[in-house]
Image (cartoon, rainbow, N blue to C red):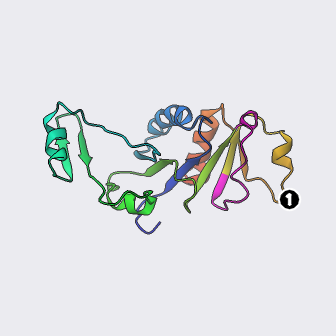
Amino acid sequence: MKNAQIPILGFAAHSGTGKTTLLTKLIPLLRNANIRLGLIKHSHHNFEIDKPEKDSYRLRKSGASPVMLVSSHRRAIITEFDTITEPRLDTQLKAFDQSELDLILVEGFKAEHFPKIELYRPSLNKPLLFPNDPMIIALATDDSRHPTLSAHNCPVPMLLDINNPHAIASFILHEFLGLAA
């Protein structure tokens, strides 16, 4: 990722595996370790973050892009894309202020080339992304003894317990970011 100014770590999995659930548990743990982090989430759906009755929505719909909505609590920048196409993570990093961050977590963009932790629940009967993705640095699962994991000819990356966010946070802090224990 040429537009990454800081470490980026993705969480990749099939829908329904629990990416958002895990991230909502990991983020406070990383923040408690004084990690300043941002997050980029890929959505496969069209979405509106503004409401039709609001001025900012009406201004955007009249043709302004980008539109920045600012209050004393937060800022949102809404940019309309001229061409409807799947977004590329590296392109989105150009628009993401990284200047005061230590780490960017990414949910989705599983086909892109950057370090990722794969979340895998054998009970969902979905195929592993590993070993076809050489950027998977760890595999978080709820069944580390499942035959699917031992059926591969290459070694599985670091195995983590998907239900132990403290262990995953420790892996991120010490193995991925290289911080002292």
Mark 1 residue element:
loop
Image-based side of 150 in relation to 110, left or right: right
Q: Is residue 156 above or below residue 13?
A: below
- Identify the residue under disc 1: 153
Position in image of residue 121 (x %, y %): 71, 37
Main SS of the magenta part reads loop
> Any magenta on residue 124?
yes
> Any magenta on residue 174?
no
Task: Please give the range of residues in magenta.
Answer: 121-137
Position in image of residue 163 (x %, y %): 66, 31
Image-based side of 53 in relation to 138, left or right: left
The amino acid pointed to by label 1 is: Asn
Identified at 71% across, 54% down, the residue is: 130
Identified at 85% across, 48% down, the residue is: 150
Identified at 73% across, 57% down, the residue is: 131
Q: Is residue 134 above or below residue 48?
A: below
**Residue 153 found in image quarter:** bottom right
Total numbered labels placed on residues in the image: 1
**Residue 113 found in image quarter:** bottom right
Position in image of residue 87 (x %, y %): 42, 57
Position in image of residue 98 (x %, y %): 35, 55
